[in-house]
């Protein structure tokens, strides 16, 4: 801060630090945290280099309530729905969609943020490009910052997921991919993978893609536009009238 009278505050001699420790835990080893996101109530989801995804309640950061085992790929980015029921993890070559809901021994439905899921962890869904689209995206292009559409009100549900890879913005219909009976999952063994998506192609590499906040939805459309940024241009459009 600049002031005509000179030094405003000497931090070395200040009676109290500018920032105070609130809560948390200093882990000594083995975490390799890479990214995090927050639910509407302040709970935290953290992605790690070993592929694990940990859930912390809003009451304590000392120990994770639930830890989803890794699939072998580092988690580069993570997002979570406003209600905390779904988590979206980004790896270099695929996305991981995880449901956090479970029923405890008393028959109460909870999320993995406020209860320990233990052996009730559901199998994740994998979102991938087809071999052809993966080839067209380029061998050196990786998935980047997969996110849900932007909702910050109780009772409203995210509609889409979007991720960037090279010159592609890839959009999945959230209602479809979280439906266990979706046609993509039929006749698949093991972990289910969804290849049902829409691609928006740009002339240049895409820096980021994300939906505007839900409150900016056009009056005659159910959701806000998608914004895509390249090094030289920012554009937006609505996907509501298009099949995803």
Image: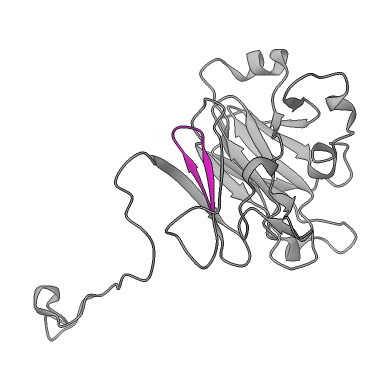
Which quadrant of the figure contains the N terminus? bottom left
Q: Residue furthest front?
A: 105
Which residue is farthest bottom?
5
Q: Quadrant of residue 233?
A: top right
Q: Does 73 appear above or below 150?
A: above
**Can the viewer see residue 229 in this picture?**
no
Q: How is the image coloured?
A: one colour
**191 horizontally vs 3: left or right:** right
Residues rendered magenta in the picture: 45-55
On the image, the x and y values in percent for residue 50 come to: 45, 32
| Quadrant of the rendering where the C terminus is positioned | top right
- Give above or below for 95 relative to 19: above
Q: Position of residue 227 (x, y in %)?
A: 66, 48
- Residue 53 among those drawn in magenta: yes
On screen, 195 above or below 11? Answer: above
Q: Which residue shows up at 25% across the image and 75% down it?
A: 18
- Residue 36, x across and y down, in percent: 50, 50
* Residue 93 placement (x, y as % from top left): 58, 24
Query: Taken as a whole, is the magenta stretch helix, strand or loop?
Result: strand
- Residue depicted at 79% across the width and 57% down the height: 157
For the residue pair 197 and 203, the one nearer the viewer reads as 197
Left or right, 16 with reference to 232: left
Residue found 64% across the figure and 37% down from its top: 163
Q: Is residue 221 magenta?
A: no
Q: Is residue 82 left or right of residue 22?
A: right
């Amino acid at each position: 801060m600049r002031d005509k009278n000179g030094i405003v505050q000497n931090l070395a001699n200040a009676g109290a630090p500018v920032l105070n420790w609130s809560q948390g835990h200093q882990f000594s080893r083995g975490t390799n945290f890479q990214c995090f996101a927050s639910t509407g109530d302040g709970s935290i989801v953290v992605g790690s280099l070993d592929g694990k995804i940990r859930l912390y309640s809003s009451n304590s950061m000392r120990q994770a309530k639930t830890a989803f085992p890794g699939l072998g790929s580092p988690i580069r980015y993570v997002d979570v729905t406003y209600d905390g029921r779904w988590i979206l993890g980004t790896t270099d070559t695929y996305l991981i969609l995880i449901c956090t809901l479970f029923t405890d021994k008393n028959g109460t439905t909870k999320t993995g943020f406020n209860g320990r899921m233990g052996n009730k962890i559901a199998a994740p869904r994998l979102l991938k490009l087809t071999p052809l689209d993966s080839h067209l995206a380029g061998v050196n292009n990786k998935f980047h910052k997969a996110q849900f559409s932007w909702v910050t009100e109780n009772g409203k549900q995210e509609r889409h997921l979007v991720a960037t890879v090279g010159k592609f913005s890839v959009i999945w219909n959230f209602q479809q991919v979280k439906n266990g009976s979706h046609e993509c999952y039929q006749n698949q063994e093991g972990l289910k993978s969804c290849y049902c998506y829409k691609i928006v192609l740009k002339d240049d590499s895409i820096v980021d893609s994300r939906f505007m906040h839900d409150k900016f939805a056009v009056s005659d459309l159910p959701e806000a536009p998608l914004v895509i940024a390249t090094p030289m241009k920012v554009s937006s459009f609505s996907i509501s009238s298009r099949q995803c």
